[in-house]
Image (cartoon, rainbow, N blue to C red):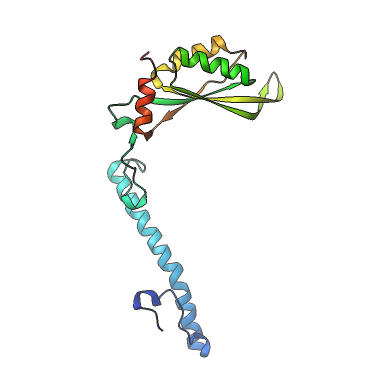
Amino acid sequence: MPLPAPFRVFSPPTSAAASPAGAQRALLYGRRAPFAGALLFFSIGAVSAAVAFRTGCAISHRRPPFLGARGLSSTRMESASTTVPSIVVYVTVPNREAGKKLSQSIISEKLAACVNIVPGIESVYWWEGKVQSDAEELLIIKTRESLLDALTAHVKANHEYDVPEVIALPITGGNTKYLEWIKNSTRDK
């Protein structure tokens, strides 16, 4: 049974090898699929470039629904009035006890809404002129961006390392209820 007309370009005719002209036609048909794919690829790229030119930023336009639009329960940080700019902060600690003690003091001071303690990490780093390697635990701290300075000061005052790791990453979106919970579970300043 022959394929419908739009799909014939993607498959060579069944009698292609019967003659030299048929072999040449098969070669031509075999090249159409990559050509059609390339044409589609470049068409999508042209649309993206046009949107980027119009908005001034390649990642500032919203995705079409068929590319995975956000659900109703998620939000972008800059457009949500019920949330505040929030961050995730990484802090490493030498062991479980130090991690629990520091986590509890951070939460007690309302410097963060939540601290995850991730056991079993191995840190390789440059210290005192040579490569060091130590087993550590990682604290993943969720808090307000406005509390970063107070959180950093608290970690430095209560950490046993001379130079504790305090690295902040922005939260650019997520579950609106969770982001509201971060706001409501932390102090203002």
- Which x, y percent locates residue 153? 50, 11
**Front-most of residues 126 and 5:** 5
Q: Residue furthest top?
A: 157
Q: Is residue 71 left or right of residue 30?
A: left
Examine the image and state in which quarter residue 123 appears: top right
Residue at the location (54% across, 12% down)? Answer: 156
**Front-most of residues 32 and 1:** 1
Residue at the location (39% across, 79% down)? Answer: 3
Number of marks in the rendered image: 0
Examine the image and state in which quarter residue 5 appears: bottom left
Examine the image and state in which quarter residue 92 appears: top right
Whether residue 118 is situated above or below residue 42 in the rendered picture? above
- Which x, y percent locates residue 178? 38, 30
**Front-most of residues 120 and 80:** 120
Whether residue 153 is situated above or below residue 27 in the rendered picture? above
Whether residue 34 is situated above or below residue 86 in the rendered picture? below
Whether residue 171 is situated above or below residue 163 in the rendered picture? below
**Front-most of residues 2 and 110:** 110
